[in-house]
Image (spheres, helix red, strand yellow):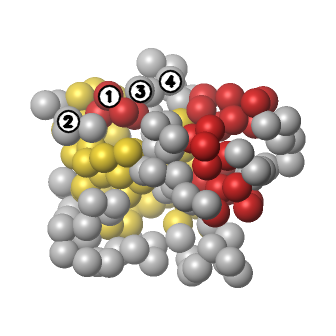
Amino acid sequence: MRSDPAFFHVHGREPDTHPMIEVPLIECVAGHGIRGDRYVDFKDDYKGQITFFSLDVFDELRAALSVHDCSPAATRRNVITRDVDLNGLIAQEFEVQGVLFYGVQECSPCYWMDRVIAPGAQQFLKGRGGLRAKILSDGQLQSTARILEQTG
């Protein structure tokens, strides 16, 4: 697996008026979410305490839809990674920089993708919308993160 840098994004507010905020470090709180994210403590046993998305899929999306002026932040996922089969992490424990996660389910793309990326983005991303995960241990992720290993 290549060690390309990941990008971290924190949800500030609703997507209509507030973009994702790119940060160099995020603090993961086990069972709760990302400190400062609008979804921290969203609800008990929330499946999307943290979300992951593949930059490889984003690059394919941009090429397929001829999109040149769009950032991975448009996907509204927290962690952007490369060379990782995110769907393969569903129902698996995995580790990033010493922080443990459990892959819960795919992040299904929503209509919002067609609006902020390009028409057809939602359909293109079906089955490749990223990964929702639970945070199993406290820790920080820095922007050089990559998924290190499956633990389960």
Could you give the CA–CA distance between mark 2 and mark 3, rounded to whole angstroms? 12 Å
Judge whether 45 appears above or below 90 on screen: below
**Label 3 element class:** loop
- Farthest residue in the left direction? 152
Judge whether 70 appears above or below 48 on screen: above
> Which numbered disc, 2 or 4, marks the residue that appears first in the sequence?
4
**Label 4 element class:** loop
Could you give the CA–CA distance between mark 1 and mark 2, rounded to whole angstroms? 8 Å
- Farthest residue in the top direction? 1
Q: Which residue is mark 1?
A: 88
**Label 2 element class:** loop
Could you give the CA–CA distance between mark 1 and mark 4, rounded to whole angstroms? 12 Å
> Which numbered disc, 2 or 3, marks the residue that appears first in the sequence?
3
Q: Which residue is mark 2?
A: 92
Where residue 110 sits in the image (x, y, percent)?
A: 55, 58
Pointer 1 and pointer 2: residues touching (CB < 8 Å)? yes
Side of 134 where 48 appears, left or right:
right
Where residue 82 sits in the image (x, y, percent)?
A: 54, 30
Sort mark 4 into few (<14), some (14-19) or many (20+) by Cα contacts within 10 Å: some
Residue type at numbered disc 1: Gly
Pointer 3 and pointer 4: residues touching (CB < 8 Å)? no
